Image: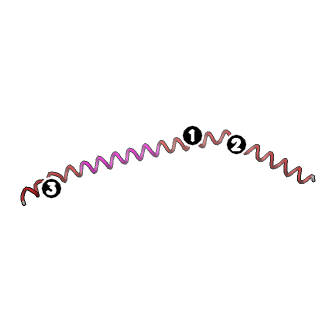
Amino acid sequence: MKKTIEGMILASLLVSSLAAFADSGGDIVAARADEATQKTMEHYRQEIKERAAMAASSHKAEQPGADQDQGHS
């Protein structure tokens, strides 16, 4: 009986300490995750813009040559 009561006390202390940790720690973890997501998405947007600009510039560079080839045929 004594071991059962000690086990229940230990379990309740563990649960209460985990609840306290999760209460304040969860907010911090969520804030860090949101910040990391925002940074990642901004980096991704920048990469997409750079790739689109490179594709547009290479497409423009190919256009005059293609027109000249068609004119010579």
Amino acid type, mark 1: Ala
Q: Are discs 3 and 2 less than 8 Å apart at CB?
A: no
Magenta-tinted stretch: 39-57
The answer to whether 45 is drawn above or below residue 1 in the figure is: above
Q: Amino acid at mark 2?
A: Phe
- Residue at which label 1 appears: 31
Residue 61: x and y in percent read 19, 51
Left or right position of 9 against 1:
left
Q: Secondary structure at mark 3?
A: helix
Mark 3 or 2, closer to the camera: 3
Measured as percent of width and height from the top left, residue 46 is found at 38, 44
Residue at image location 7% in from the left, 56% down from the top: 71
Q: Earlier in the sequence, mark 1 or mark 2?
A: 2
Name the residue: 31% across, 48% down: 52
The verdict on residue 49 being magenta is yes
State the separation of the CA atoms marked 3 and 2.
Answer: 66 Å
Left or right of 11? Residue 71 is left
Indicate the secondary structure of the residue bearing disc 1: helix
Tell me the amino acid under the disc marked 3.
Answer: Ala
Disc 1 vs disc 2: Cβ atoms closer than 8 Å?
A: no
Residue 3: quadrant of the picture: bottom right
**Which secondary structure is most common in the magenta stretch?**
helix
Position of residue 40 measured from the top left corner of the image (x, y, whole percent): 46, 46
Of the 4 image quadrants, the one containing the C terminus is: bottom left
Mark seen at residue 21? 2
Which residue does the numbered mark 3 point to in the structure image? 66
Distance between the Cα atoms at labels 3 and 1? 52 Å
Q: Earlier in the sequence, mark 3 or mark 2?
A: 2
**Circle 2 — which element?**
helix
Nearer the N terminus, badge 3 or badge 1? 1
Visual colour scheme: secondary structure
Eye-nearest disc, 3 or 1 = 3
